[in-house]
Structure formats: C-alpha cells, structure tokens
C-alpha cells in the first residue's frame, strides 16, 4: 500500500474489477448451488430449466441463477409470497403439469415486508404474480400502481363478499381469510368459576383485570387487526378511551403473537398466567389435548376483525398469462380445499369441504368488525402513533 | 521488487471494496436517496420534524445507553472467560468453548421466548419481577455477544508469550499490576475490536429488543423498521438511518484511534506452550467462567427441556418430526432438508467471507509509512465494519431498488443470500485476524526478505504460523454467523429454499404445542450442528503450519 498511482488508473481498475467480479461471483456461487438443489429438495418448486440457455442469455450475468423471468424464458412463472405461504407439493406439481409453466415461489419476509417490496419495485417487479397482500396493505399496493387489472372468470360466488371496494377489486382477488379474535382458556374460567368475557367492552371489566394479553399493533399483524377491531367497534374518535381503560385494567402488550400465545397465555403450551389472549378464530382446534375430544379454548366471535389475503398480477410482468394462471389456480377448488391445513386460514370458496377438525371446531364470525381498507391506509400512521402513546408508554 | 507487494495488496483490496460498494454502499445510498431526494430534488423538510419528535430522542438515547451497557457487561464477563478457555489447560475445555458459542446462532425470537418463559410471572424466575423491564434486554445482549468477546480476545490471547507476565511477577509485581501493565496493553487491540463488534451488534439488535422489551423500549433499529415497513415513511427512515450512520462512523473513528495508540508487536508462541494448568490464583476467573456458562446454559437448558416436552409427558417426538417432510402442513420441506439448505448457503457465505476477510485483514494490518496511506488503511478498516451498524431493513430494501437493472439485476439471485451473510461475517473475520496480524513485528518480514525470500514468501514465513489458528477460529465463526442469520436474509426476495432459521420462524408463528415443540427441537439441532461444525473446523491442522 505504499505506492501511489495516478488516480484515474485506480478508478478504471475498480470499475473493471467490480464488473468482472460480480459477473464471475454469480456463476461461481450459483454453480455451487445447483447440484445441491437437485439432491436436496426432491419436491421443491425449483425449476430445472435454468440449465439450458445459460450462455446465450447475454443480458446479464445473473440470468443463469436469477429466477426473474426474461423474454427468452417465458416458461417460468414466479410467485411472490410471504414467509408463511405453503401449499402441498402435489398441488404445485399439478399446476405445472396442467399449464406447462414452471412455478417458482419467491419468499420475501412477513406480509408487511412483502407488501412494501411490491410497492418499492412497482413497474419493475421481481416476480410475475403476488399472493398474500392483506386487508391492511391492499390499498397501499393498489395505490402504488404495482398491479395489473385481472380477475379470473368463473369465481365462486362467495368470493364477492370478501372483495375490496372502489375499483380495487379489479386488481386483487380474495384467496383466503382469517378472523383475528380474542381467545379464552375455557378450562381456566370453568375452574375459577368466573363467567368468561363475551365482547371487547367486557375486557375493561375489573373482573378481568390482569387477564388479557395481546401482541402490539405496531409490530404484529394480528396486533394491528385487534387495534382495527377496537377502532371499528368504538369509532375513530372513541377507541382511544377504550384503550386507556384496557391498559388501566392490566392488559399486557407483547411484541409478537408468538410470545403472547406461547409464553403469557395459560393454554398456549407454556406456563402463562393470562387466560385471555388475542389470536385467531382458527386457533382453538390446536388446543384439543391428547386423548381429548374438544378444545380447551374458545374464540369470542363478537370480537373478530377479518383479514383477507389477496392475489394479483404484478404490473410490468413479462409473463401476464402465466401470472393470471396462478391467480386462477389459487382460486381452484383443490387449492382452496388445501388452504386450511396448509396456511391456517379459511378458503374464500365456501363450497369446498373443510377438514374435519375445522368443520367441527373452527368457527368464523358471522358479523366481523369492519374498517375500510382505504381508511386503514389513510389513517394507519396516526392510529399507530396514538396507539403507541397509550399502549406502550 | 520492493514495490510489488504493495501494489498487489492495493489491487487485492479492490476486490472486497468492490463488494462493499455494490452490496452495501449502493443499496444504502439508494434508500437514502429515495427518502431525501424523492422527486430528484433534495427535500429535507422532514428532517426537523423527525428530529423534533420526543420519540426520536428517546429511541436514540435508549439505543446508545443500552448498547454501551451491553458492551461493558459483555466485556467484563467475557474477559475472564476468554482467559480460562484460551490460557488454561484443563479437561472439557473444548466443550465449554463450544457451549459459549451456542447462543450466537440461536434464532432471536426463540431466545426471546425462552428468556420470557424464564422471567414471566409464571416462570421459574418470575419472582425477580424482571419481565417487561430493560434488564432482560441487557441480559440478552450479553447472552448473544459473549462469544464475540471470548473468541476475538481469546484468539489473540491464546498465542501470547507468557514470559513477559512471568518476568513482571518475578520482579515482584502483584497479579493486578501484571494484568494492568503487561497483559491488558497486549490485549487492548483485541478488546477494542471485540467491543466495537459487540456495540454494533447491540445497537442493531432487532428481534430480541422487540420480544423482551415488550414495545416499551424502541431502538433506532426497531424505529426504522416501523417507519419503513408499517408507514412506508422513507423520509423519516432515511433521517434515522443517517443518524445511525453518523453515530456508527463516530464510534468506529474513536475505536480506531484508541486501537492504534495501543498497538504493539507481541512475542507469540504456540498455544500449547502458552496454556498452563489452573492454579489457586485463577479461582476468580474460574468462578466468572462458571457463572457465564451457567448463564448461557439456563436459557439453552430451558430450550432443550421444553423441546422434550410432549403433551403431558416427555419424549423425542419433536425431534423425530424434524426428518419427516409430512410432519406438519406448515412446512413444505422437512427440517433436515432445510438444514441441508442452511449448510450449503453457509459454505458459500463462509468461503466468500473468509476470502474477502483475509484480504481486508492483511491490507489493514500493514503500516504504510506515508501518513496519507496510513489514514486510508484506517478508513478502509472502518468501512468494512459499517454493514453491522446499519439497519437490515435499509440494506434489504435498498437491494431491491438499486440492484434492479442490468448488469446488476441481482434482486432475486440466489447468490444474494450468501453475499448478505458474508457481509455480516466479514467484520468478524477481520476483527479476529487483524489484531493478530498487527501484533507480528514487521521486522520479521523484513528479516525474511533480507535472507532472500520474495515478498510473498516473506509474509508467509512471518505471518502464516501465527495466523493458522485464528483463521480456523474465524472460519468457524463465519460459518456460525451464516447458519444463524435471519434478519438480513428475511428482507431479501429469495427463492423458496428455506434455511433453518426461516423454518423455525414459520413453525413458531403457528398455533399448537407441536409446532412450538418442533421449533424448539429445530433450534436445538441448529445449535448442535453449529457447535459440531465449529469444533471440527478448529481441530483441523493445516499441514505443518497449524501444528506448532
């Protein structure tokens, strides 16, 4: 390092090296990955087609490994989804067999991270189609012009009740929904001889002091749903008072659903001391004890906020037909029937047969609390800041 | 001939620099530009607003104070442990070294849940009333970062010649005086290196602050997440990222100054020669080590115990489920397949991180005579620490908006994951190797050159022997970083080839005791695999070089 060279040479060298390096490193690392792919994931969605035109795809050095479609590669369709997306391999294989497309799944963090990735890459997407945009982010994604209008033909009738409004339904098609509800440990209440709560308003009753735990609205998607439930129930000017009472009554706010349910809840597998928790309407079936016949917990169906997950074709995709095929496939009876067991939410098609446990124990709210997605997007920041002041001090 | 090695080194330094430019500087400036130059014009209107918020000040203060406290406590506990595990010779030393490293790879959300299970009102330590206070956050900082101190300092300490200490003692110096005047100055560069790393890790900790702080204790990192992911307030996020950047640069400059002032060449010997049997005077250090091991084992033990709990009884069902792809519909691959994915990614990331890290360490350990080049080297040194101090949200989203067109359309390339992990491992590698390299007297190289060795040969003769063991240690460390990495990886759009931390996250977000049990079992497996791999790597002997 003791030398001094004319600066211009160094810059040129940097440039040359940067380019050369990036190009070679991709092939090196990518090449190392490929044999592994084949042996490691027998039933994965990785497409084996990438081997073919490695060298002639001269547009960039990453083409050989990047799943992003190029004009020469229309056989592949890339589905962007959040980390919780999963469906049985047979269904993915069936899609590929029926349509001739290779389906690649691309995961991008939680629902919020993914929605923002879609917004940030609007017009120049990394995938062709997206699944998992939820009620709370739908307006943001549609507003960013990140989607192309598409709606499959022959949708089941029941889809309509989950539709977005004001034109957004042309861009995003509902796929599944889940109700976020207050859950109670029925066994605990029976043992203590206390009458369990029924409504959101009940939770501020001194009888339930120090018994409720919920994930926070700013860090957890069910937590946000619960805040929205209280806003929908009490009104945009009134919910703050409710939350003050709730906190004064000893409600506990954790950062995520996991630790609320598994650490603080009395029936979540840990040694918690709070018998009322914010969770999902679909949670109770998982609390059937070994050898038992019914769940030890129950969802309070008057406290539910409905979260719908949507799919849509990404604007700027190279493969609109493939993308549309994926949306239609997500609404097909086979996929709809597999959704409960794979993703723990209800299919939008109410004609598919639910798994036994679900049919018996997982209920949906008849009249869930509603806040319009547009209002959510417009007010989210104000609400969350106000909420943080009240709930997190 | 005189000039050749310098030139070659300068060129070699361009390789890691290019990486830093493409995979760090470019994405971060892209995000800052989105926030501050929204429509091609500089818009700083949000700056006073963001800075004026009471919350911003609170968040900044808490980040600084908690990271400082975390660093100090980790150092205080880590130094005696490093001494015991790297200077004393006793049975089961290897096992203890492995135990101390385990926390480093455990997924933060799992550790958060374990800490809370211990400290929550219904838990075994619930009586302490610590749940929801700042204390668990501090404890978690120590838990995760103990390995950083023990290994960075231990690597330097291991080969330190004992004779200087012994002479001082023979001349009548008390143990405290020996430590203060001989040992501490020799270790100072390693200690400062470790402190820098721990501070950076603490100040950007995310999951653990959220889980344990119960939302009351926001840090700059959690605030950037909130602004970016919830509000898409890129301007506010950019302002905070800039603040974060400034603070990190100031801290690195301070560390570099302190370090350079204290650097000295050390007489080094083989580790075997330096280690001795424990004596009575070592009891305080041994006690501190016992405390540290117990502190590490308590949450890890809770984890193991709970992973064995099946319904009302006990059993290995959760472990058996790890190999079964159909164990739960929540996962498309079995956990063991995910482990194979993790290992493959980790190999790529480790090779890359070591290659770049070695180059950087060699370059920054040289002492150019011209002050300007000396400064350049020192800036270079700091530059490679930066990725640890900047929010993963900023870098992750930055990838998306900057690496989006040819020739750098890498947004969804599978190489991004190992690269992102290598960028995290690289500072650890450099901070492990650079203090050791700097302790080698440059005259040794010169002597070799005088005896007719070419520059490469001279460097090899003088430096390779002392470097062999730290290189192995750094390799193991880089591997562990990659195996456990989740934060940065989760912000990348990546092909569906889940790694173990991703799978654990999927499992733990599902209701049902079985999912929780599997997540815990998978965490235990991850920790075990890490410990085994690191153990094997460290036992390798590179030809005669490592044999001492």
Image (cartoon, helix red, strand yellow):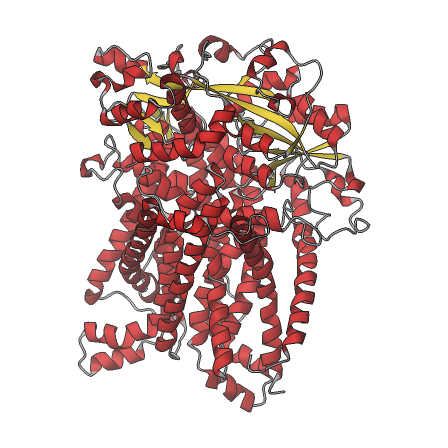
Q: Measured from the top left, where is residue A319 in percent x and y?
A: 74, 34
Q: Measured from the top left, where is residue A236 in percent x and y?
A: 38, 23
Residue occupying the point 50% across, 69% down: B380
Q: Is residue A69 left or right of residue B57?
A: right
Residue occupying the point 27% across, 56% down: B73
Is B274 in front, or is B441? B441
Q: Quadrant of residue B87?
A: bottom left
Is B446 in front, or is B42? B42
Q: Measured from the top left, where is residue B204 in percent x and y?
A: 41, 51
Q: Quadrant of residue B8?
A: bottom right
Q: Is residue A360 left or right of residue A77?
A: left
Residue A256 visible? The answer is no
Residue B118 visible? The answer is yes
Vertical arrangement, residue B501 with respect to residue B188, above or below: above
Count the marks.
0
Which quadrant holds the N terminus of chain A? bottom right
Q: Measured from the top left, where is residue B503 in percent x and y?
A: 51, 36
Which quadrant holds the C terminus of chain A? top left
Vertical arrangement, residue B333 with respect to residue B79, above or below: above
Residue occupying the point 40% across, 77% down: B268
Vertical arrangement, residue B177 with respect to residue B299, above or below: below
């Amino acid at each position: 390092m003791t030398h001094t060279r004319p600066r211009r040479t160094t810059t040129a060298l940097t440039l040359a090296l940067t380019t050369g390096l990036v190009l070679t490193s991709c092939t090196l690392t990518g090449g190392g990955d490929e044999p592994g792919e084949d042996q490691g994931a027998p039933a994965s969605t990785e497409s084996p087609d990438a081997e073919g035109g490695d060298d002639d795809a001269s547009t960039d050095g990453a083409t050989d490994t990047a799943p992003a479609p190029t004009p020469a590669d229309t056989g592949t369709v890339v589905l962007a989804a959040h980390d919780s997306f999963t469906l049985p391999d047979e269904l993915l294989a069936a899609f590929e067999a029926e349509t001739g497309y290779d389906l690649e799944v691309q995961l991008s963090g939680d629902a919020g991270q993914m929605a923002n990735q879609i917004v940030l890459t609007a017009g120049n997407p990394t995938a062709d189609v997206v699944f998992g945009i939820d009620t709370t982010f739908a307006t943001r994604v549609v507003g960013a012009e990140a989607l192309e209008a598409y709606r499959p033909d022959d949708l089941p009738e029941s889809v309509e009740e989950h539709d977005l409004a004001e034109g957004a339904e042309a861009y995003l098609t509902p796929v599944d929904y889940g109700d976020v509800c207050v859950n109670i440990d029925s066994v605990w209440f029976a043992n203590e001889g206390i009458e369990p709560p029924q409504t959101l308003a009940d939770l501020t009753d001194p009888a339930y002091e120090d018994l409720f735990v919920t994930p926070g609205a700013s860090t957890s998607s069910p937590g946000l749903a619960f805040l929205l439930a209280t806003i929908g129930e009490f009104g945009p000017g009134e919910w703050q008072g409710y939350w003050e009472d709730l906190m004064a009554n000893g409600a506990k706010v954790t950062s995520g659903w996991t630790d609320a349910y598994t650490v603080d809840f009395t029936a979540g597998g840990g040694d918690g001391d709070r018998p009322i928790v914010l969770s999902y309407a679909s949670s109770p079936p998982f609390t059937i004890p070994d050898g038992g016949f019914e769940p030890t917990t129950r969802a309070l169906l008057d406290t539910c906020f409905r979260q719908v997950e949507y799919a849509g074709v990404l604007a700027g995709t190279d493969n609109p037909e493939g993308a549309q095929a994926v949306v239609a496939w997500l609404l097909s009876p086979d996929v709809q029937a597999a959704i409960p067991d794979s993703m723990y939410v209800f299919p939008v098609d109410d004609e598919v047969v639910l798994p036994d446990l679900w049919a018996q124990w997982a209920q949906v709210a008849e009249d869930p609390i509603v806040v319009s997605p547009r209002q959510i997007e417009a007010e989210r920041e104000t609400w969350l800041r106000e909420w943080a002041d009240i709930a997190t001090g | 001939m005189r000039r050749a090695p310098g030139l070659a080194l300068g060129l070699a330094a361009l390789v890691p620099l290019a990486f830093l430019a493409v995979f760090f500087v470019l994405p971060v400036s892209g995000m800052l530009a989105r926030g501050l130059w929204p429509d091609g014009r500089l818009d700083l209107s949000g700056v006073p607003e963001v800075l004026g918020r009471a919350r911003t000040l609170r968040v900044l203060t808490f980040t600084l104070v908690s990271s400082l406290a975390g660093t100090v406590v980790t150092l205080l506990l880590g130094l005696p442990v490093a001494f015991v595990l790297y200077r004393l010779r006793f049975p089961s030393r290897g096992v203890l070294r492995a135990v101390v490293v385990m926390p480093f790879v455990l997924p933060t959300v799992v550790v958060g849940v374990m800490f809370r299970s211990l400290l929550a009102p219904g838990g075994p330590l619930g009586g302490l009333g610590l749940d929801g206070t700042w204390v668990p956050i501090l404890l978690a900082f120590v838990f995760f970062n103990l390995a950083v101190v023990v290994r960075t300092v231990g690597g330097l300490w291991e080969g330190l010649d004992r004779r200087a200490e012994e002479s001082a003692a023979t001349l009548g110096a008390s143990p405290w005086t020996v430590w203060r005047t001989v040992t501490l100055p020799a270790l100072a560069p390693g200690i400062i290196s470790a402190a820098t790393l721990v501070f950076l890790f603490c100040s950007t900790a995310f999951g653990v602050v959220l889980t344990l702080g119960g939302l009351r204790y926001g840090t700059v990192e959690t605030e950037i997440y909130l602004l970016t992911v919830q509000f898409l307030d890129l301007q506010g996020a950019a302002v905070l990222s800039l603040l974060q950047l400034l603070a990190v640069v100031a801290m690195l400059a301070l560390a570099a100054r302190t370090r350079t002032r204290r650097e000295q060449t050390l007489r080094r010997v083989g580790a075997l020669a330096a280690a001795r049997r424990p004596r009575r005077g070592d009891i305080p250090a041994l006690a501190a080590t016992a405390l540290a091991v117990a502190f590490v084992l308590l949450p890890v033990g809770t984890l193991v115990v709970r992973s064995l709990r099946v319904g009302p009884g006990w059993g290995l069902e959760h472990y058996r489920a790890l190999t079964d792809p159909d164990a739960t519909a929540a996962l498309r691959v079995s956990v063991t397949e995910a482990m194979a994915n993790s290992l493959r990614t980790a190999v790529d990331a480790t090779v890359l991180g070591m290659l770049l890290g070695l180059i950087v360490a060699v370059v920054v350990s040289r002492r150019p005579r011209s002050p300007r080049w000396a400064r350049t080297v020192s800036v270079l040194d700091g530059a490679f620490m930066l990725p640890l101090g900047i929010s993963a949200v900023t870098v992750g989203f930055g990838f998306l908006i900057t690496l989006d067109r040819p020739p750098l359309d890498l947004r969804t390339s599978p190489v991004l994951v190992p690269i992102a992990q290598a960028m995290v491992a690289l500072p650890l590698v450099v901070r492990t190797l650079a203090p050791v390299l700097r302790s080698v007297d440059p005259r040794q190289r010169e002597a070799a050159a005088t005896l007719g060795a070419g520059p490469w040969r001279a460097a090899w003769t003088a430096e390779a022997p002392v470097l062999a063991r730290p290189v192995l240690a750094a390799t193991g460390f880089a591997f562990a970083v990659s195996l456990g990495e989740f934060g940065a990886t989760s912000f990348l759009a990546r092909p569906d080839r889940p790694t173990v931390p991703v799978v654990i996250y999927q499992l733990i977000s599902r209701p049902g005791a079985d999912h929780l049990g599997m997540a815990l079992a998978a965490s235990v497996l991850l920790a075990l695999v890490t410990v085994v791999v690191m153990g094997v790597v460290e036992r390798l002997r590179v030809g005669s070089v490592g044999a001492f």
